[in-house]
Image: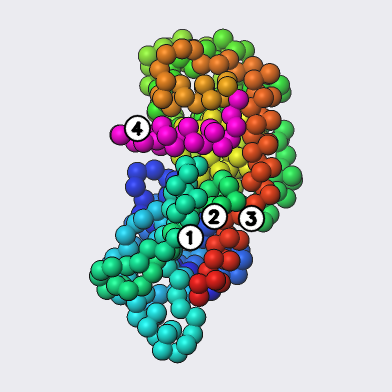
Amino acid sequence: MQFDLLCRVIDNFGDIGVCWRLAADLAVRGHAVRLWTDDASALAWMAPQGAPGVSVHRWPEAAPQGGTGDVVIEAFGCDIPEAFQAAIAKADARAQAARAPRPVWLNLEYLSAENYVQRCHRLPSPVMSGPARGLTRWFFYPGFTPATGGLLREAELARRQHAFDRHAWRARHGVAPGALAIALFCYEPPALGPWLAQLAPCADAHLLVTPGRAAAAIAHEISLKPLWENSKQLSITYLQPCPQGAFDEMLWAADLNLVRGEDSLVRALWAGQPFVWHIYPQHDDAHHAKLQAFLDWLQAPASLRRFHLLWNGVERAGALPAIDAATLAEWRDCTLAARARLLAQDDLLTQLEGFIREHR
């Protein structure tokens, strides 16, 4: 089928990251994909080789030449332009007249473990005004339970991970044998300073810091505490922007993954290593309930829940749990159990294809 996937980039890389993984996996399964976005700049390092079957286009201000595809996906409620909506309506009218399969219009929503996701997944959203009035747009919610749309998971992911040489990766990045490698991909965690102070005396700790806000946050903390910069005990490697496949490898190679946003949370779950999620902060603290719901689904042990709440600023008082071998083992067991539950469910794209077949 021909897919039109529309994505607006807000202020980070998560939206375009999720959309690119979806587009590339659709193409692997034999579909043709046009990715429409208002900011494709991150794809220069995120997907420098592109993907066969995926073409990238500027945000559409007019109807696409030749009309819309068999499936239109607006990612994260991005409100596609009226001219594009009119093209969907025109394609729908032609299909009805020819008694052919009608186009399917989907709103791919944000990921959450909150209860409303199970209630709203697959619900219709009738279009009440504008050029597409009378058509139906469908909600499709990613999620963590069988009553949701699942998570993106490429068919070859397990094979890639099994073939990955973890020791060689760590050696190339200067991680000493036996070191505690910690990948840091975050915004500005409220507990970053206290955590670095706690980590600095750890002789075998090695931080793998991703570029952008994580590197800037570390630089800020170092400027406040020069001891950390000069410490011979805390090793820091500043990484360069990398393609999505290389990002996965970093998560596989680390002993602890501190991740942020949506795409990297999913990849941390598939990695099967201990992880802490820095959820996207919202001004009204709506992310607090979202984080709590995720920790409930994760069945997070007390130490992991405590770390999350302090890391995200949901709680401010008290010390972070120590990152020792016993704690990491408990967190790893939790991650592996969660991954096993997810692997028992169909992945997002398999469910998406089934939904489209039902509604065409």
The foreground one among 24 and 212 is 24
Q: Which residue position holds label 4? A: 285
Q: Is residue 274 visible?
A: yes
Q: At 61% across and 54% down in the image, what residue appears?
A: 347
Mark 1 vs mark 2, foreground winner is 1
Q: Earlier in the sequence, mark 3 or mark 1?
A: 1
The answer to whether the residue labelled 1 contacts the one labelled 2, judged by CB atoms less than 8 Å apart, is yes
Q: Which residue position holds label 3? A: 346
Disc 2 secondary structure class: loop
| Magenta stretch in the rendered image | 280-301
Tag 4: residue type? Asp
The answer to whether the residue labelled 3 contacts the one labelled 1, judged by CB atoms less than 8 Å apart, is no
The foreground one among 243 and 87 is 87
The foreground one among 243 and 63 is 63
Q: Is residue 265 left or right of residue 180?
A: left
The answer to whether the residue labelled 3 contacts the one labelled 4, judged by CB atoms less than 8 Å apart, is no
Q: Is residue 182 left or right of residue 16?
A: right
Q: Which mark is residue 37?
A: none
Image coordinates for residue 355, horizontal then vertical, percent: 54, 66
Q: Is residue 32 visible?
A: no
Disc 1 secondary structure class: loop
Tag 2: residue type? Gly
Tag 1: residue type? Arg
Q: Earlier in the sequence, mark 1 or mark 4?
A: 1
Q: Which residue position holds label 1? A: 122
What residue occupies the far left of the structure in this picture? 130
Res 297 quadrant in image: top right
Q: At 35% across and 43% down in the image, what residue appears?
A: 11
Q: Which residue position holds label 2? A: 149
Tag 3: residue type? Asp
